[in-house]
Image: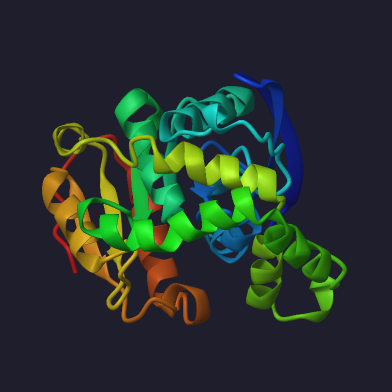
Amino acid sequence: MLVSERIGQFFVEGESGRDRLEYTEYGSGDAWVVLLHGQLMPRRMQQPLARSLAAEGLHVVTLDLLGHGRSDRPADPLVYSMTAFGEQVVALLDHLGAGQAVIGGISLGANVSLEVAAIAPERVRGLIIEMPVLDNAVEAGILAFAPLMFAARFLPFTVNGLRLLTRPIPRGVVPFWAGIMLDTLDQRADSVAAVVHGLFFGRIAPSSKQRRAIVAPALVVGHPADPIHPAADAAMLAEEMPNATFVKAKSILEWRLRPERLNRAAAGFALGCWRTSGRRRRTGA
């Protein structure tokens, strides 16, 4: 089923001044869903899921958080934090005139979704959380992102050189996920260093106490054999939140390469959030 797609932008006031954020809308109506990307990745990575959900009648919006994709990329680490990202999602809802939305995302986007539920619970109709980064991911996260921050700050030619190599490649001539990888490598060293620094030295997610207070229905998806996003974190989160369902993906690539099962689960969950106003315990698969 074909759905309408529209690109928009809005502005937020931050430490660096007035910053521009860009988003894409899929479909229409009042059953809003906001999908968020992983760290340093573009919103386009959520395009397949957004189109699938919009085909079910949902009004889906994908957002490039500050420092990502086609949004502004200031080089000041003070503008980057989970709380700031959560506030950007709330600002998006205000801009769209959406009172509530199902908020979801992968990795960074999953943690930002939790942040929105913590700082503005009245705006959250439900949560779709894939690969959250919580207590069990600390060591792997340090090993993965500390060298990246070091390279971006002290060896900027490594990051800027990759940008020079990857940017001229036409995205239309490569497979979709290869294009997403090329977009992810299209970075400026100063903004990468700022993003990673801001997140590295800030709180990575709401505390366990705050997570236990999130009463919105939640679909939590965990992957096996993923040290940066261990399934143990996803399972723990589903246990902490009183209205959560835990779904175990067959592999880290299932939702990217064979998405039908998880797309159906996400669509059924999001539609269910909009069909009922009640909060009830969802038993997992």
Q: Nearer the viewer, residue 38 or 156?
A: 156
Q: Nearer the viewer, residue 263 or 177?
A: 177
Which residue: 42% across, 63% down?
144
Question: Residue 103's quadrant in the figure?
Answer: top left
Locate residue 74, reporting x and y percent.
68, 34
* In the image: residue 184, left or right of residue 241: right
Locate residue 116, reporting x and y percent.
39, 32
Which residue: 63% across, 41% down?
67
Question: Residue 119's quadrant in the figure?
Answer: top left
Locate residue 128, reporting x and y percent.
37, 52
Above-or-below relation of 276 to 224:
above
Above-or-below relation of 72 to 261:
above
Q: Nearer the viewer, residue 247 or 141?
A: 141
Q: Nearer the viewer, residue 273 or 156?
A: 156
Q: Quadrant of the N terminus?
A: bottom right
Its colouring scheme is: rainbow
* In the image: residue 38, left or right of residue 224: right
Which residue: 48% across, 60% down?
147
Q: Quadrant of the C terminus?
A: bottom left
Above-or-below relation of 129 to 9:
below
Locate residue 208, reporting x and y percent.
16, 39
Which residue: 69% across, 54% down?
156
